[in-house]
Image (cartoon, helix red, strand yellow):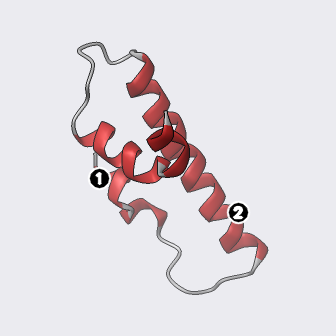
Amino acid sequence: MALKADDSLRLTNVLLVNPVEKLRSGYWNEWAKKIAKNIICAIQRLYYMYDYSGTSDTHNLPFRKV
């Protein structure tokens, strides 16, 4: 799927806000949760690597509000 590979952040946001499967343990719901977690971990690693002392609040990212 091209959207999954090219724009995974946007697809993740859409899937977390509007689940496409009735079961919470469906493939797309689990995929979206996994990608959101990976993005948060990557952002936190970048903050740590570059010793960024600004606002590093990863809890206010759009997909964390779900």
How many marks on residues?
Answer: 2
Circle 1: element type = helix
Task: Give the farthest residue toward the right.
Answer: 49
Q: Position of residue 11 (x, y in %)?
A: 38, 44
- Classify 45 as above or below 8: below
Which comes before the other along the chain, label 1 or label 2?
A: 2
What's the residue at 52%, 50% (across, down)? 6
Circle 2: element type = helix
Task: Give the farthest residue toward the bottom.
Answer: 54
Label 2: how many Cα within 10 Å (few below 14, some 14–19, many 20+): few
Q: Position of residue 5 (x, y in %)?
A: 55, 43
Q: Does 23 sit left or right of 9 as displayed?
A: left
Give, as a three-letter code, the residue at label 1.
Answer: Lys
Q: Position of residue 22 (x, y in %)?
A: 23, 15
Q: Mark 2 highlights which residue?
A: 45
Q: Are marks 1 and 2 in contact (CB under 8 Å)?
A: no
Looking at the rendering, which quadrant does residue 23 occupy?
A: top left
Q: Does 56 sit left or right of 53 as displayed?
A: left
Q: Which mark is residue 29?
A: none
Residue 3 or residue 8, whichever sits in front: 3
Q: Mark 1 highlights which residue?
A: 65
Give, as a three-letter code, the residue at label 2.
Answer: Arg
Quadrant into which the C terminus falls: top left
How many angstroms separate mark 1 from mark 2 (CA)? Answer: 21 Å
What's the residue at 40%, 15% (across, down)? 25
Task: Give the farthest residue toward the front.
Answer: 2
- Classify 21 as above or below 2: above
Residue 57 or residue 6, whichever sits in front: 6
What's the residue at 48%, 64% (across, down)? 58
Q: Position of residue 26 (x, y in %)?
A: 39, 15
Label 1: how many Cα within 10 Å (few below 14, some 14–19, many 20+): few
What's the residue at 45%, 35% (across, down)? 33
